[in-house]
Image (cartoon, rainbow, N blue to C red):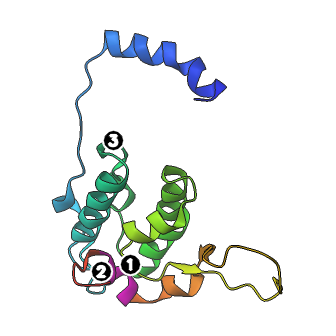
Amino acid sequence: MNTADRSIALMDTALRRRFEFVEMMPRYDNLPKDIDGINIGEMLKAINERIEFLYDRDHIIGHAYFINIETFEELKDVFKNKIIPLLQEYFYDDWEKIRLVLNNNGFIKEKEFRYIGNLDVDEDKKVYEINNNAFEEIENYKKIDDVKAK
């Protein structure tokens, strides 16, 4: 917990005493069923199931990120600018877990190093990076909720 979190802890407690909070889970049925063959609700449901398993239920992604999407271009923007950064924050840049959440769909790839040379390093170490080209492929979005994909 950092200083900013501690400074709002008392306010959070005060709000919880004075107000009633109603949990609002993602409403998958309110999301577009077909954007270039991608069922947004099913895709988000798959992402959230993996987040709940790998992290916890409190960090699942709400439907608001996807509610106004009408085109594939808008979907790409949401993933690049909202979903990937959010997953980076959730998993503290643990790219292997982010890859698992996205069902190894290609958005995250292993980084190749050319200049390491003969350094005495761990041979099994993997470093990842965002694969910007993968956001252009519709099939990569479809892989997210494909339970048969590896």
Q: Tell me where the magenta segment starts and ends, as one range.
A: 139-144
Please give the residue where the numbered disc 1 appears in the rendered image. 71
The label on residue 35 is 2
Disc nearer the start of the sequence (1/2):
2
Is 141 in the magenta?
yes
Q: Is residue 56 above or below residue 100?
A: above
Q: Marks 1 and 2: CB-CB under 8 Å?
A: yes
Q: Is residue 8 above or below residue 98?
A: above
The label on residue 130 is none
- Identify which amino acid the numbered label 2 is placed on: Ile
Relative image position of residue 32 (x, y in whole percent): 24, 70
Decide if residue 100 is on the left or right side of residue 93: left
Q: Is residue 77 above or below residue 143?
A: above
Please give the residue where the numbered disc 3 appears in the rendered image. 58
What distance separates the C-alpha of mark 1 from that of mark 2?
6 Å
Task: Decide: few, some or many residues near mark 1? Use Cα within 10 Å; few <14, some 14-19, many ≥20.
Answer: few
Mark toward the viewer: 2 or 3: 3
Residue at image point 35% right, 62% down: 66
Residue situated in front as seen by the camera: 31 or 54: 54
Whether residue 63 is visible to the viewer of this picture, yes or no, is: no
What distance separates the C-alpha of mark 2 from that of mark 3?
28 Å
Relative image position of residue 139 (x, y in whole percent): 36, 89
- Identify which amino acid the numbered label 1 is placed on: Thr
Residue situated in front as seen by the camera: 54 or 9: 54
Mark toward the viewer: 1 or 3: 3
Relative image position of residue 25 (x, y in whole percent): 23, 45
Relative image position of residue 128 (x, y in whole percent): 60, 74
Disc nearer the start of the sequence (1/3):
3
Residue at image point 68% right, 73% down: 122
